[in-house]
Image: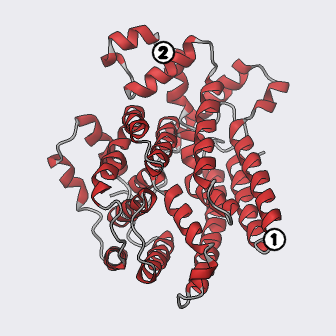
Amino acid sequence: MENYLAFIMCVALFAILADGLTSRYPNMQRQLYKVFFCLIYFLFLIRYYYGPDIWNYVHHYEHIISPIELWHHPEWAYYEWGYDMFCCLLNAIGVSYWGVTAVITTLYFAALACLFHSLHKYRATVLASIILLDYNLIYAENRQCLAVALFIFMILCLQKEHYLSAVILSILVVLFHKSGFLPVGLTFMGIILHKQRQSALLYNILIFVLIGAMLIPVTRVASPLLNVLPLPESYISSMGHHLQLGRQFQIVGLIYLAILVFISIWNAHNHKTYSWIAIEVLIGVVIIVALYQYYFFLNRMRSYFVPFIVYYLALHISDSNREEHIPYMALLRQGIVALFFVYSAYGTFRYTQACKAMHAPIAKASTLFDLRHHSPKQIRDRQMKIAYQYWKEDYMKSSQNKL
């Protein structure tokens, strides 16, 4: 298979169509969700030495120090201390690198399953939307995928008022990936909103700010501000790297705008209090608007909030009783889904074309089934060679959006 990820994306697109066609048949819709959930989880689970990031992660895992050494010398950690300890422990009990990716993938999908548990409709659409927006997180970004999974569990613990567990998980989120300090910090700052009445005003302000960001070029403003932030040098360096790309107008901006309008209209007619998930939605859309033009950086940060935003939308979309009392809500709901489907289908096509233009066959399938014909070392060496070629010849070489 020439493009394994494109195949998974097509499965996700089909899940959205199937979910919509069975919306009048709840039992069938629930069964289809289970089928698509298991299928997509399985497709990610069986990837074997797949993706460009294995060039760093495999070398790191194969030469990891012992857990005792890392405990006594935390400064020896190559990545974040939590991720290094996680790898140390798995390596010490003889888990292969595929085992590491399998554990991370399982934790992430388990977190999604727990989040979706209270949804009664459109769960397949919610799952597919997250996959289409965050496939890169799942297949390539081990550390952040682990951090995002723990962050989802953290918010679910807050929802159930298991505060001690939430605090422990918040510490682990930051220990597993440096980007975790921002969502965790903002979440605990959001405690001032908990149980307060939601208002459409905040979302109306964000709508106007986003429209401004789509019309006014401001992409060169943020980079100089990094130098004055009170953050460690490694954080500044990482943020600077992710601020190298920017674009003023993006098609996805229309989806962001439609989501903001939907939430604004809903809150204008339903003055509910802020739950922890509603707080995450607000924080998430604020980050999306603030970082809209810096899409490379935003794609990293939004991974923490996309599951909650999509869940929040599905929760209200499925509330047909209230929807009848809100003008044009059904039309807006259908418009968001249709726009997202077209955007994702086009994105899948563009991704396929971009992979064909690369020197490295980075998207070509590599799964556990390859072990029928090749040894683990043969597959490992082949995939590492492809990953090295990608970083040397393809990474950010063709981007037209460098700042």
Is residue 385 something one can see in this rendering?
Answer: no
Residue to which mark 1 is pinned: 25
- Residue 286 image point, x, y percent: 35, 64
User: Quadrant location of residue 295?
Assistant: bottom left
Who is closer to the viewer here, 140 or 197? 197
User: Quadrant location of residue 45?
Assistant: top right
- Residue 303 image point, x, y percent: 48, 52
Q: Secondary structure at mark 1?
A: loop
Answer above or below: position of 375 versus 72.
below
Q: Furthest-bottom residue in view? A: 327
Q: Secondary structure at mark 2?
A: loop
Q: Which mark is residue 64?
A: 2
In this rendering, position of residue 293 left or right of residue 46: left
In this rendering, position of residue 82 left or right of residue 366: left
Answer above or below: position of 79 versus 30.
above
Answer above or below: position of 381 versus 213.
above
